[in-house]
């Protein structure tokens, strides 16, 4: 059965837009997903669904969350195959052993990733930025709080994407692989 990684943007940060993970899991199961497993408290899940495309699933999840919680939650869904391409596409891992300092931006479309090209002007050495068809990767050598590029990515420029640090990406990848096995 196809498995998917579900990423919510901007939930459980501060007091606004609270989505308890137990409720999130129930929403996923209510939409016909099976083996729904959440990770951390920041809107990450791995699910299986017998017959739905990623684009349809993200829309259905967003609609259900808005109906239940009363606010809009951007949702990005990647098939386990798409998610694996993001993991294997990272060329910065060698220079970024500090996983929390390596951010990965996920988007629904290649155009949204392409819109992040302007981040390059904000990257200052020894930071590194990599953009490809599947994701954007930003290594913040001095830390995320010290990075102008990270502040832009996590702010207005990053509205069409959601970011995760590399440690979370690897945990989700392992969870998706476990689900596929």
Image (tube, helix red, strand yellow):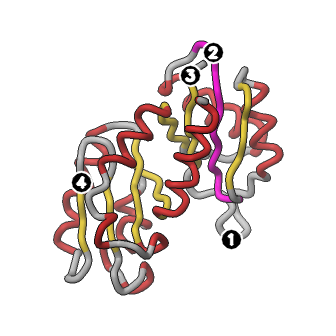
Task: Determine crowd level at label 2: few under 14, some 14-19, many 20+ residues with C-alpha closer than 10 A.
Answer: few
Q: CA distance from mark 2 to mark 1?
A: 35 Å
Label number found at residue 131:
4
Q: Are marks 2 and 1 in contact (CB under 8 Å)?
A: no
Residue at disc 3, secondary structure: loop
Residue 125 shown left or right of residue 82 in the figure: left
Q: From what the image shows, is residue 180 above or below residue 8? A: above
Q: CA distance from mark 1 to mark 3?
A: 34 Å
Per the image, the residue denoted by label 2 is 50
Q: CA distance from mark 2 to mark 4?
A: 32 Å
Q: Are marks 1 and 3 in contact (CB under 8 Å)?
A: no
Residue 29 shown left or right of residue 78 in the figure: right
Q: From what the image shows, is residue 170 above or below residue 107? A: below
Q: Are marks 4 and 3 in contact (CB under 8 Å)?
A: no
The magenta-colored residue range is 41-51
Per the image, the residue denoted by label 3 is 2
Residue 126 shown left or right of residue 16 in the figure: left
């Amino acid at each position: 059965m196809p498995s998917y990684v579900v990423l919510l943007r901007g939930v459980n940060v501060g007091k606004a837009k609270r989505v308890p993970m137990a409720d999130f899991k129930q929403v996923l199961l209510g939409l016909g997903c099976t083996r729904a497993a959440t990770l951390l408290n920041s809107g990450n899940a791995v699910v299986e669904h017998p017959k739905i495309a990623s684009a349809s699933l993200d829309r259905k999840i967003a609609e259900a969350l808005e109906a239940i919680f009363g606010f809009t939650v951007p949702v990005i869904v990647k098939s386990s195959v798409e998610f694996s391409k993001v993991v294997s596409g990272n060329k910065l891992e060698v220079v970024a052993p500090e996983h929390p300092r390596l951010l990965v931006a996920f988007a629904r479309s290649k155009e949204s990733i392409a819109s992040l090209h302007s981040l390059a002007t904000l990257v200052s050495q020894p930071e590194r930025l990599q953009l490809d068809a599947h994701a954007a990767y930003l290594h913040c050598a001095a830390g995320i709080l010290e990075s102008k590029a990270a502040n832009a990515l996590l702010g207005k420029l990053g509205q069409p994407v959601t970011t995760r640090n590399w440690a979370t990406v690897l945990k989700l990848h392992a969870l998706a692989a476990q689900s596929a096995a």
